[in-house]
């Protein structure tokens, strides 16, 4: 296989996902997921058991041996193996098999951000008896650069006693008392030139996310002098365990599941996963949902990125109710790079430009005026400046105006000295390029065009970027995937938003120092944007909560993080509001003292699954115990004890919904909470009772929320909130009402069909092109 040239956009890799729907004799990697580990005395060891299953289907021990890629079995039941379509069909019908998944590809989706969140360095250190040092954050990503100053272990003692992991030290990789474990997974043996066969991160992404969640303070960190200051993670004292599943080609499902299987058994407390699949699947076809379900059962909290497919509706990824889904928003720092024209006009653009044009004016040309006619390109196409479309004689030594954003490769090929590109409205995303670049609005692109057309010798210069205050923050980034949940409209997703725009954090010195992948410069800190960056902010905050309250369940931690979030003004948004930011902006300092929590056990999530159409047979496969689905009317998930309220209404129907919730007191023993409802006039909302007196910590109280209103149709979102207040704590939960098609309630039970079949009939499958 040739090395696929990664088309790096401003934000992340675009990887085409090819569906294989045709029948094939060729054996391809699949995951055979078999639910919870069986318990009891007569249970076989996992590997011999899987071999036995494989032998039965494949016909020989030899074939079974050759086919098996992974035995999971440390934390849940299942294996990965090479199977033909017929073999997949046989496994799909087999007793005990929950689902058979193709080995689909996942995509990878400072540090001013913590200060912006009001979370001081001092606060981040003073938590719990162990000062945070007992909390282990598992990072499922591209690996880590262990020599980075962000992961220095000076002052750290040996790993906590509960640690049961390992460090794979191939090719010169080392762990320390900060990075206490590291593993890598590449079941397909798909290594390409940039890949290092060890947990070492050659791409930069995993080092970036790990340092956001748990990096220690590093003074004087900057990207070529820009954004200079202290780089730090949310939980600087936490330990880091690394699970490398992403390579230059992407991240495979079988590897992601293997990482969860190990992370759970190794003893991590928090799992941070900044990757996702770009098509809609049910929970048991989604490795991140399966893995985080088993993690939740063992008290491990998972935080996942919402995806970079916004601002499309229902584009949110990682939407299982037992994990925290994190969207991305801006911080109060933006990077501007001014464009100065020969006539003195100045335009404000966005980009991380560390290059000094030193005020020198360079000739300015429109890409369309440099069409490479010999290669049969015309001005209209060359105006986008795609690689190979420009005439290098005309571009050499010039600043080029391009009509489409790119990594700049087309202009670099033609030896241009600068690029002007159009920006996305509202985002202020600034990406680093390998030559002076600025992104200006489409309107300003037209103004610069006018200047080019009206001057004999158009000239321009691009100034070094400056960090300036952004008063519009926090604003949900347009790339951040929006809700509602594509498969469970009763659960509001994403859960909240966290900083994910222009975040400075650790980088691999061997990774490209800009969005241009052949950039040969080296940097130890890098400015990056995406929900990949917002997710580890929530993971860091969760580690802080866990260090303070080691016995809290994943649902309690999640509730604490959501109900204490900074309120975002919905009036800044038109049709998306909570579907862009969920409960609001992460507020780590408040999350340790939420007052009340909406707790939930594994049983509660299984009850939710019953209401989504699972029956006792299918449920037991997943739970591995004697749990049963009571005979409830299938279809609604309103009563899952979730810290938000989502009410989907079929077009033309009256608004009508009842939610039952239970809150647990984790604040002062004696306290009385009063409910406040904040909703627009189109809704009638009552909370019964509206006063909840508590006399002990751990005491539980129930309440019921009734929502009603007139007939509605085509309502994108009505947003409000319910807040419980005791004078000290404000426990805020968003409430949204929106209209859906009747088909939104056609829930599906776990399918024993392969996900490729399931996905191919789903409207949201296929290739997504993000920004
Ligand atoms: C540690 O991992 C090993 C290997 O998977 C397992 O056998 C053992 O039970 C684990 N120990 C603990 C305490 O979880
Ligand atoms: C091991 O890693 C260190 C630090 O990156 C490097 O200096 C050294 O050359 C490496 N050695 C080998 C054999 O790769
Ligand atoms: C025109 O395009 C071809 C193919 O991309 C390229 O090889 C050639 O160098 C280009 N010509 C100039 C003058 O840039
Ligand atoms: C939440 O429920 C779990 C059991 O599911 C329990 O262990 C925990 O103590 C409860 N409370 C909190 C605050 O986590
Ligand atoms: C449970 O659901 C599965 C999958 O939808 C179905 O095949 C099975 O017949 C159901 N079992 C019962 C007892 O309804
Ligand atoms: C809480 O109130 C009860 C009765 O009002 C009282 O007996 C108890 O001492 C109080 N507890 C605390 C910790 O204040
Ligand atoms: C809310 O309830 C009141 C009293 O029952 C009723 O008069 C009013 O029309 C209701 N408003 C809506 C929007 O349904």
Image (cartoon, helix red, strand yellow):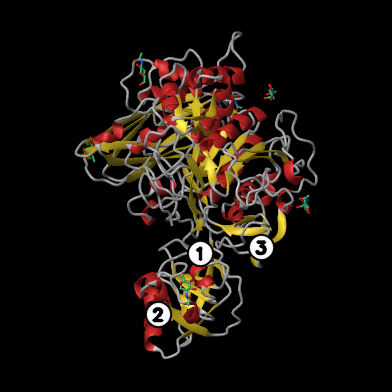
The picture places residue 77, in percent across and down from the top left corner, at 55, 22
Crowding at label 3, few (<14), some or many (≥20) Cα neighbours within 10 Å?
Answer: many
Q: Which residue is mark 1?
A: 407
Mark before the other along the chain sequence, 1 or 3: 3
Q: Quadrant of ligand 5?
A: top left
Q: Secondary structure at mark 2?
A: helix
Apparent side of residue 428 relative to residue 654 in the rendered image (left or right)? right
Who comes first in sequence, dot 2 or dot 1?
2
The answer to whether 1 is drawn above or below residue 67 in the figure is below
Classify mark 1: residues with Cα within 10 Å, few (<14), some (14-19) or many (20+): many
Residue shown at 63%/49% (left/top)?
195
Q: Which residue is mark 3?
A: 222
In the picture, the disc for residue 369 is 2
Q: Are marks 3 and 2 in contact (CB under 8 Å)?
A: no
Q: Nearer the viewer, residue 186 or 117?
A: 186
Please tell me whether mark 1 or mark 3 is closer to you in this view. Answer: 1
């Amino acid at each position: 296989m040739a090395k696929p040239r990664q088309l790096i956009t401003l934000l992340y890799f675009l990887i085409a996902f090819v569906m294989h729907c045709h029948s094939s004799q060729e054996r391809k990697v699949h995951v055979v997921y078999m639910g919870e580990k069986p318990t009891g005395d007569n249970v076989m060891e996992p590997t011999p058991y899987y071999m036995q299953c494989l032998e039965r289907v494949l016909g020989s021990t030899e074939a079974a041996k050759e086919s098996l890629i992974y035995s999971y079995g440390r934390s849940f039941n299942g294996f990965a193996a090479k199977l033909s379509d017929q073999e997949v069909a046989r496994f799909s019908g087999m007793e005990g098999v929950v689902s058979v998944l193709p080995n689909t590809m996942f995509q990878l989706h400072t540090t001013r951000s913590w200060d912006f969140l009001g979370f001081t360095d001092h606060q981040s250190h003073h938590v719990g008896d162990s000062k945070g040092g007992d909390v282990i954050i598992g990072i499922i990503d591209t690996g880590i650069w262990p020599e980075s100053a962000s992961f220095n272990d000076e002052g750290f003692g040996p790993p906590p006693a509960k640690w049961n992991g390992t460090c794979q030290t191939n090719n010169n990789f080392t762990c320390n008392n900060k990075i206490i474990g590291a593993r890598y997974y590449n079941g397909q043996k798909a290594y390409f030139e940039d890949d290092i066969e060890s947990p070492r991160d050659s791409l930069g992404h995993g080092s970036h996310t790990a340092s956001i969640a748990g990096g220690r303070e590093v003074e004087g960190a900057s990207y070529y002098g820009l954004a200079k200051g202290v780089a730090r993670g949310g939980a600087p004292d936490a330990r880091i365990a690394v699970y490398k599943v992403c390579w230059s080609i992407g991240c495979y499902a079988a590897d992601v599941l293997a990482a969860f299987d190990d992370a759970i058994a190794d003893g991590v407390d928090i799992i941070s996963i900044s990757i996702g699949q770009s098509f809609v699947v049910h929970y048991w076809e989604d490795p991140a949902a399966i893995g985080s379900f088993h993690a939740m059962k063992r008290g491990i909290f998972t935080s996942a990125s919402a995806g970079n497919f916004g601002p499309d509706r229902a584009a949110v990824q990682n939407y299982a109710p037992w994990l925290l889904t994190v969207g991305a928003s801006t911080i109060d720092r933006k990077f501007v790079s001014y464009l100065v024209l020969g006539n003195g006009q100045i335009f404000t653009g966005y980009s991380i430009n560390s290059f000094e044009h030193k005020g020198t004016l360079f000739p300015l040309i429109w890409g369309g005026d440099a069409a490479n006619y010999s290669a049969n390109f015309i001005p209209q196409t060359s105006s986008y400046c795609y690689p190979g479309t420009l005439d290098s004689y005309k571009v050499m030594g010039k600043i080029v105006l391009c009509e489409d954003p790119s990594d700049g490769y087309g202009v670099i090929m033609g030896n241009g000295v600068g690029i002007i590109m159009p920006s996305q409205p509202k985002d202020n995303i600034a990406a680093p390029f390998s030559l002076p670049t600025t992104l200006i609005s489409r309107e300003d692109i037209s103004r610069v065009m006018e200047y080019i057309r009206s001057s004999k010798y158009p000239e321009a210069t691009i100034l070094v970027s400056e960090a300036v205050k952004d008063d519009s923050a926090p604003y949900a980034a347009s790339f951040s995937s929006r809700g509602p949940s594509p498969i469970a409209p009763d659960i509001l997703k994403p859960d909240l938003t966290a900083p994910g725009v222009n975040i400075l954090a650790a980088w691999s010195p061997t990774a490209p120092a800009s969005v241009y992948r052949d950039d040969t410069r080296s940097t130890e800190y890098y400015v990056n944007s995406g929900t990949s960056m917002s997710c580890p902010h929530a993971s860091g905050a969760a580690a802080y909560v866990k260090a303070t309250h080691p016995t809290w369940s994943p649902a309690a931690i999640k509730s604490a993080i959501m109900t204490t979030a900074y309120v975002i003004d919905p009036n800044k948004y038109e049709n998306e509001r909570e579907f862009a930011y969920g409960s609001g902006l992460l507020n780590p300092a408040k999350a340790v003292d939420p007052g009340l929590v909406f707790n939930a056990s594994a049983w509660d999530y299984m009850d939710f699954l019953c209401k989504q159409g699972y029956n006792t047979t299918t449920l037991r496969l997943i739970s591995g115990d004697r749990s049963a689905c009571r005979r409830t009317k299938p279809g609604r998930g309103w009563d899952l004890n979730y810290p938000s309220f989502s009410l989907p209404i079929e077009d033309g129907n009256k608004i009508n919904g009842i939610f039952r919730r239970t809150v647990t007191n984790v604040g002062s023993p004696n306290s009385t909470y009063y409910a406040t409802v904040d909703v627009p006039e189109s809704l009638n909302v009552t909370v019964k009772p509206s006063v909840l007196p508590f006399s002990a910590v751990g005491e539980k109280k129930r309440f019921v929320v009734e929502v009603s209103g007139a007939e509605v149709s085509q309502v994108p979102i009505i947003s409000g909130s319910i807040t419980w207040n005791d004078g000290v704590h404000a426990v805020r939960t968003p409430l949204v009402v929106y209209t859906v098609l009747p088909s939104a309630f056609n829930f599906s039970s776990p399918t024993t069909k392969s996900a490729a079949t399931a996905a191919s009939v789903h409207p949201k499958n296929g290739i997504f092109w993000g920004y």
